[in-house]
Image (spheres, rainbow, N blue to C red):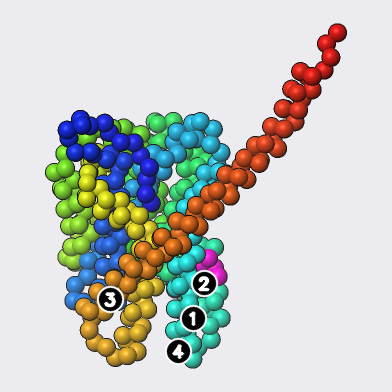
Amino acid sequence: MILNMHQELAPRTAPKLEHRFVFLDGLRGLAALCVAIFHATLSFRLGFLPRHSVLAVDFFFCLSGFVIAFAYDRKFATGMSVGDFLVYRVIRLYPIILVSVLFGGALLMGENLWAGSPITQSALLTLASLFLLPLGLRFGMQAYPPNDPLWSLFFEFVANAVYGVFGRRISPLLAWTGLLVLAALLVHVVRVAHGIAEIGFSNIKLFSFGYVRVAFPFLAGVLLFRLGGHRQIAPLVCGSAVVCILLVMLLNDYPLSAKVPYDLVCVLLVIPALVYVGAMVAVSGRLSALSTWGGAMSYPFYLIHGPTIGLVHSVTTKAHLDYPYTSAVVGLTLSAALSYIALHRYDIPVRAWLSGRHRQFAAQRRFRKDTPYLLARRQHHESPRL
């Protein structure tokens, strides 16, 4: 998402710096690319596997908590309702969910037709995925076969709903205490699952662990924003260090024997630190434009790359084309192209229309609510005085 955030004042002789958390937008784009690279290497068997790219999802959760707190803490304090908040979150997230599920569902049903199998199950899975229902678990599959990354959107909505209901009602002491409790729970579930990679989607038990997986980083992001460190400006060299640490954390392909400690250190310490420091980094010029573009592309790219890579893999397999690296590049390039089209030709216009309609509805609702009061005042002022 593109964030509308404040700009820091700078001397006229200095280059204009944007401190709207644009740097965090760029980090979100890099993390989405790492997830896509992971799926491409997995699908086309490229000889290496950045197995730790799954931690990008935990980075997304932490970043989401930070951004949600920035965007809505003050709005809730000035009277925004939970209903309006949830409507705006659905408007922000659902249009791309819709198109990605239809794309992935069509591919899934097409594979069934090609194999001469009935499409009833695939159609049911697609319909359930449109409502973020993890029906795949019922059939012994991953939660969302039409598009695997949907599991993280389910938990994103859960975290958003909890924030909307309780976010401004709990004291800081209770929030920090809750974070420590969630950290302990996260240690437990990661140890039980032998790592964080499959938590949230692989089976019913691991799906239930997903609530803990989202809760800690999301709450950490909210509390990091409320610490206020982002009001400071960090030098760009800190941004370079953040980028390097993020890429090394996500793209290394070492099969660590200490997988559980690695995952826990990254989620509990490294990812919150990257978000906290990254929020201080101000960027300008072309770097700002690139970061903004990466942030805008990250969400559609994250949801569209899976079906797209699946389509390229299906075509190359059926055509007996054994060019794995070329196929991976084609899959990633096509994913970026389709994401760009979806963003500018579909997502942005649809969200603008839905937001406008909601504002009109909210204005009409307020008018109907205020009309009896205004009429009573008018009658009072127009009544004859004795």
Among numbered discs 1 and 4, the one appearing first in the sequence? 1
The residues tagged by marks 4 and 2 sit, at their Cα atoms, a distance apart of 18 Å
Residue 235 coordinates in the image, percent (x, y):
16, 39
Q: Secondary structure at mark 4?
A: helix
Residue 311 coordinates in the image, percent (x, y):
37, 78
Q: Residues within 10 Å of mark 2 (few under 14, many from 20)?
A: many
Magenta region, main secondary structure? helix
Q: Is residue 374 left or right of residue 234?
A: right
Kindly check if marks 1 and 3 are in contact, taking CB atoms under 8 A apart as contact: no
Q: Quadrant of residue 370?
A: top right
Q: Which residue is mark 1?
A: 109
Q: Which residue is mark 2?
A: 126
Is residue 269 visible in the rendered structure shown here?
Answer: no
Q: Secondary structure at mark 3?
A: helix
Kindly check if marks 2 and 1 are in contact, taking CB atoms under 8 A apart as contact: yes
Among numbered discs 4 and 2, the one appearing first in the sequence? 4
* Amino acid type at image mark 3: Val
Q: Which residue is mark 4?
A: 114
Depth check: give the residue in front, 10 or 57: 10
Q: Nearer the viewer, mark 3 or mark 4?
A: 3
- Residue appearing at x 51%, y 78% in the figure: 122
* Amino acid type at image mark 4: Trp
Among numbered discs 3 and 2, the one appearing first in the sequence? 2
Q: Is residue 22 left or right of residue 160?
A: left
Q: Is residue 356 left or right of residue 67?
A: right
The residues tagged by marks 2 and 1 sit, at their Cα atoms, a distance apart of 9 Å
Magenta-drawn stretch contains 126:
yes
Mark linked to residue 330: 3
> Residue most toward the top?
386
Q: Residues within 10 Å of mark 3 (few under 14, many from 20)?
A: some
